[in-house]
Image (spheres, rainbow, N blue to C red):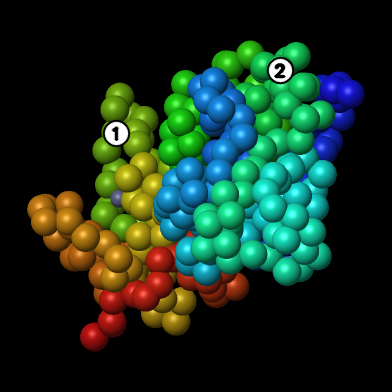
Amino acid sequence: MPMDRAGILASFDKLRLWQRDGQRAVHKPLLVLLALGRLWRGESRAFEFSEIEDSLEKLLTQFGPPSAQATPHLPFWHLRTDGIWTLEGPSKILDRPPAASPSKTELRQEHVRGSFSSEVLESLDRDRTLIAALARRIVESHFPESLQQEVLTAVGMEGLTDASPGVQTTVQARRDPQFRERVLLAYEQRCCVCGHDLRLGGQVVGLEAAHIKWFQAGGPDIEPNGLAMCSLHHKLFDLGVFTIAATEFVFVVSQHVAGGGDAHQRMLSYHGAGLVGPQSATYKPSAEYVAWHRDQVFREPGRELK
Ligand SMILES: [Zn+2]
């Protein structure tokens, strides 16, 4: 029996939750996005683990917390307990208790296949706009605005926009509209990394208010959780290219950053440099939020500070 729209949205809602205080739980959401992307493009609805293993591992590496790498088999197995996912394969694997997850090799060798449950598939067939709505809800729940489009592109849904049929933004609406203005004022309208303060007709352009602890993880809309950053540094910060050493308020760049040209050199030149600080000490980044960023977003290890 296909479910109605509300039923489908509700059955996926569990995936929008964050586990424990601010710990990022992106395994299942990223697998679901990958599977939704396949439906969106009209590809086969059931697939072997080995078909998506590399893509899922790449997604986890790029958009997950550092601890999520190399574990694409976990959501493939555990999503079954959420009631929206089924597996096909030999019973010696499928009959195991939920906690006894098979290894990557077992899933590969036994050709275990996964797909959304038939109820879910029937519902998505009847109302194709649900695919877009689900993808948007999941992305908005787990990723900051600066990365949402990037994640959708990575799962092959780059055509999906806020204007796509069936898409309603849910998360953004709850944000404090004053946050950007207050943070930009605190940092005197310039990027705290590079000092960018370009104006066009008196209006500052390409400057944003970044959350240190993501809004999606419960980070509050207050100045000590905000940094004024140009669009580029905002995105790099949200991807974990660099973080802040809380004790000295200097930038720490990830050892994973590479590149041969100017962009790489420029990024490295900020390593160990102090933040272009706020105009009052009361706006300084709070150690609690900085620690969250280092733990949940930053690509450890960081380069050494001299
Ligand atoms: Zn900048």
Q: Is residue 36 left or right of residue 279?
A: right
Which mark is on residue 31?
Answer: none
Pick whichever of labels 1 and 2 is earlier in the sequence. 2
Residue 162 or residue 103, whichever sits in front: 103
Q: Quadrant of the N terminus?
A: top right
The residue singled out by tag 1 in the image is: 199
Q: To which residue does mark 2 refer?
A: 125
Q: Position of residue 3 (x, y in %)?
A: 86, 25
Amino acid type at circle 1 is Arg
In the rendered view, tell whether residue 269 sits above or below residue 226.
Answer: below
| Image quadrant in which the C terminus is located | bottom left
Q: Residue at x 77, y 40 (%)?
A: 84
- Which amino acid is tagged 2? Asp
**Coordinates of residue 201 in the picture (x, y in percent):** 30, 24
- Residue at (52% x, 69% y) in the render: 67
**Residue ID at (57%, 49%):** 111
Check disc 2: other Cα within 10 Å, few if <14, some if 14-19, many if 20+.
Answer: some
Which of the 4 image quadrants contains residue 254? bottom left
Q: Position of residue 121 (x, y in %)?
A: 73, 26
| Mark 2 element type | helix
- Do we see residue 105 in this rendering? yes
Pick the front one: 138 or 184: 138
**How many numbered tags mark residues here?**
2
User: Where is residue 231 shown, x and y percent of the image?
Assistant: 36, 42
